[in-house]
Image (tube, rainbow, N blue to C red):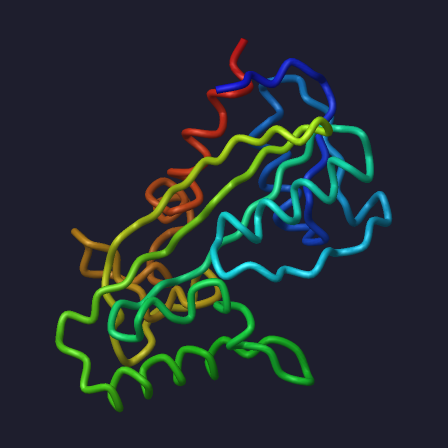
Amino acid sequence: MRSFDGDRLVIATHNKGKLEEISALLEPYGIAVTSAGELGLDEPEETETTFIGNARIKAHAAAKATGLPALADDSGIAIDGLGGAPGVYTADWAETPQGRDFEMAMSRAWRELEEADAPFPRTARFCCTFVLAWPDGHDEVFEGHVDGQIVWPMRGAQGHGYDPIFQPDGYDTTFAEMDRWEKNRISHRAKAFEKLVKVFER
């Protein structure tokens, strides 16, 4: 694994919340962080069919454009009874002309499970992939996932996305019913973060 020995890093995102989350993680390592959005970079088209593929597109585009190492992530939910869907299209399922509607996306997921007569428990997993890319084309990949099942009706008002219908293994609450600190401790992103930070340890 290649170590990160610089002091500047581009986060390949236009999402302010994601930038804040990753910046806080990297603060102890003395790394100055900026984002693709802040630098005015275009968002590359995500044409791959895997989380790794789309994260690689974003990370390498930002590294090439800035001459700095760049970090990107791609994440989503894979539902076994739907053949792994929505997967990389997790956010796309929520798109409407007025913005993202995750209640609509969750309703679609449950409706399609019912139409498929999917067996119970309706297993699923949240997945997160980080790719750290260097300007010379090298990259390192870090993956995390958390297994669970899809439940209905929606439960809880915390979290975001598909959290109200995802109950992680070993818990009787959905992600949306959990305190955010508890969710962040066990989440797919937390597990990928644990692997990622080893690159910054000196």
The picture places residue 193, in percent across and down from the top left corner, at 46, 34
Quadrant location of the C terminus?
A: top right
Query: Is 140 left, or right, of 175 in this rendering?
Result: right
Query: Is 166 left, or right, of 90 in this rendering?
Result: left
Q: Nearer the viewer, residue 122 or 184?
A: 122
Residue occupying the point 72% across, 53% down: 14
Residue occupying the point 59% across, 45% down: 56
Q: Nearer the viewer, residue 16 or 118?
A: 118
The picture places residue 129, in percent across and down from the top left corner, at 47, 45
User: On screen, 84 above or below 43?
Assistant: below
User: On screen, 161 above or below 16?
Assistant: below
User: On screen, 169 above or below 30?
Assistant: below
Residue occupying the point 50% across, 69% down: 89
Residue lying at the far bottom of the rendered structure:
115
Query: Is 24 left, or right, of 146 in this rendering?
Result: right
The picture places residue 150, in percent across and down from the top left corner, at 26, 70
User: On screen, 80 above or below 43?
Assistant: below
The picture places residue 71, in percent across and down from the top left corner, at 63, 37
Residue occupying the point 63% across, 60% down: 46
Query: Is 66 left, or right, of 9 in this rendering?
Result: right
